[in-house]
Every structure is written in structure tokens, then in C-alpha cells.
Amino acid sequence: MSNQNADLLFGFLRDIIYNPSSASLDVNLLEADFRALGEGLVYFAQCIQEQRRFALALSRGELHMPVPPPENMLASPLKALHGSLLHLTWQSQQVAKGDYQQHVDFMGEFSEAFNTMVRQLDARARSIEREMDLNKSKTQALEQSNALLTSLTSNAPQMIIVVSNEDGGILFENDSAKDLLHSTPTLISRLLAPEENVKDGTPGYDLELTLGDTPRYFSVASYALHWSGQNATAFLLNDVSSDIQLFKKLESHAYYDNLTLLHNRYYGMHLFHQWLDEGQEFILCFADLDNLKYVNDNFGHAEGDVYIKKAANLLQYFFKEAVCCRLGGDEFMLLIPRCTAAEASRLMEALRAHLEASNQAKPYYSNISYGIVEVRADNTLLSGELLSMADESMYLYKRAHKKNSQKRPPSA
């Protein structure tokens, strides 16, 4: 091969890899014996460009982009991933509609996290339904009673308040209601204007009050009646605080990672998009453990779990104000408010040094790689672009700091 042919072909191949936007080859400049090779490289470059555009669109979450043609075999794995993401999106939409029978078994560790979340949501919904049915049954029993006035006694477990429709005056309250009326002067006005009782999206209650520093939740039933010659309304309040606290506890399980007790991917991505929508300034940091696969393969997954939990604890220790999330496997995401990129990098380097020093007795090297993106209030980048930037920064850091060996040599 002449030097001219080699320079043209290798130069074109280099541009395909490192400068694809300007890669071009005039096959007519090649000798006749090399033109077929040149045409093949031009087609290869076309396939690479299609694959690159498709991968970039997927990284931004654009699932309805044109798919590379069937003859582009380089893009086959991405097309398979695209199909999986489309199906996963549909399953997530079904879960959002209340279909908790969805099951994912084609995405590795994400499948376990997704299926666990769906099971937790299903359990939470069933528990809340049972609690709501129980409360409904109690209210219906009171409605059907032929001796309502007899049951309005001081010993009734419900808080019972009868209010005049004419002037809003209290005509009757039982002993249970007296303490509540005394501690909440605005209670009557809240009962008479239920549209002002704003909920936080939690089902099962109609009224939220703060008594001291403690929130209390009540379901409220009202009945029109005639009392001492006046048109009145009887309010029956049931304290459902324990039910709502149970609901909130069940809900929290859907937002935390079981192994590390950090927030999970679902919560982290939800908060990340919320902060972007609110125009907040923060640091987005991706972190990835080094050598976890080596540890799992050579020392068992139990040791790998110890490694993951150690890193999670250090992330919380060094970034006390950050929202720390485990995305899955050995990947973490930090959302750090009121912090600069330089300060975040300083803390990560301190964490790396501490992690490596504290694991000197281990028979393997342990460390963590990271990528940092500073998100400003005037940010115009899409969420997918910011995530891709953090991910790329992390892998550049990992390649730059990768050790030549995973196994730690024995002590002398």
C-alpha cells in the first residue's frame, strides 16, 4: 500500500472515531485497487454516524426517533435497548394507572428495583384501601343507626360537634371535641369551609391540623339535622393520624434503596427534574465504584455489598446537605445544593482518599470515580444532556485514574 493510500484511509478512519462530523473520503483519490476498501469505509462511517445519532437520542430519552435501517448491524444492540425502553415506558404508564401486575425481567438489576417498587406500591395501595374501607364502614354504621342522638354522648370515640347554620355557633360538643376546639380556635371556620382544607395528595382524610409540633389528620362526616328549633350541621371527626402515618411510611419505602438506605433512582430522578423546573442552582454528581465486579467475582456478593454500603456511608458523611441516591449496582448520584464544583471535587477527592486508606486491609483496591456538572439558575440544557455530561465526565475520570491491577499485592 502506497503512503498516499495509507494516509487517506487511516486519516479517514481516525476522523470517523475522533471527529465524525468532518470525516470525509474522496475514493477517486485512491488507487484503483483500494477504491473498494474506501467505499467500504465510507459505508462503515455512515453506519457509525447512524449509531451515534441513535445513541445520543436514547441518552436524551427520545424514544420516538427514527430507527437505523435493518442493514446497519452495528446499531442492533441499541435497537434492542430501544425496544426494551419503549416496553418499559409502557409498563411504567400502566403502573401509574394503578396496574401493579407489571413485571420486568429483561434489564438486570434494574428489573429487581422496578419489581420491588411495584410490589411496594401494590402493598401500599391494598393497605390504604383496607384502612379506607374500615373507616367507611365505621361512618356508614353511624349513618344507619336509628339512635344517632343516643350515640352522641360524652363517651363516644368520635369528636362530635353540632353547629348552627344561622350564626355558626356551637350548639353541642362532646368531651372528645372540647380539647380540640380549645386548642384550635379556627376549627369551626375550617369545618364550614372545607374547600380551604388543602391536602398533600394523601388519600383518607379531610382535615389536617397542627397541634403543638405534631400534625393530626381527621376524616370528617357531616349531617344536616334540626336541633332545638334550628337548622344545624353535625360534624363527626375521626382521628386517622395513625392510618396516614402508616401510609406515609409505606410510601417512603418506594423511595429508598433497601441495601444502602439511600434514596433510590426513582426518587433521585424525580427530585432532579423538580429542581430543574424550579430553576435551582446545584451540583449534579455521578459516582461509580471501581472494581466492584472483580470483588463480586472473586470474594462474593456479600463482600461486594459491604463495599457498596461503605461507599454509601462515606457519601452521606462527606456530603451532609446532599441528596444521595443509589441508581443501581455500583452507581450513585448526588444532588448538592449551595455548593461549587470546586468544593464538590475537593470533597470527592477527600472521600476517595478516605475510602482507599480505610480499606488497606482488603485484598483488592477500592476507590470511586466521579463526574461533576454545575447546574446554574439560567441553565438551558435538557435533563438528558446534563445527565450525559455527568456520566461522560465520570468515565473520563475513571479512565484517567484506573489502576493497572485490581488485586492488592500481599503485605511484605
Image: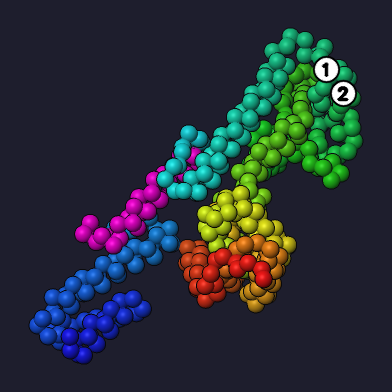
Residue 107, how many percent across, how many down? 44, 48
Q: Quadrant of the C terminus?
A: bottom right
Please report the residue visible at 33 percent of the width from the left and 56 percent of the height from the top: 77
**Which is nearer the eye, 82 or 356?**
356
| Magenta span contains residue 115 | no
Q: Residue at x 59, y 33 (%)?
A: 123
Horizontally, residue 253 falls left or right of residue 180, namely left
Q: Quadrant of residue 344?
A: bottom right
| Residue positioned most to the front | 412
Residue where numbered disc 1 is placed: 152
In percent of width and height, residue 227 lies at 81, 18
Q: Which one is in front, 40 or 363? A: 363
The quarter of the picture where the N terminus appears is bottom left
Looking at the picture, which amino acid does disc 1 mark?
Answer: Leu
Residue at the image point whose x is 87% and y is 23% from the top? 174
Q: Badge 2: few (under 14), some or many (20 or more) residues near its Cα, within 10 Å?
A: some
Residue 391 in sight from this viewpoint = yes
- Foreground: 389 or 16? 16
In the picture, the disc for residue 5 is none
Q: Disc 2 marks which residue?
A: 174
**How far apart, in angstroms, are the residues tagged by discs 1 and 2?**
7 Å
Instruction: Verify whether residue 86 appears in magenta.
Output: yes
What colour-coding does the image apply?
rainbow
Q: Which residues are magenta?
A: 68-97
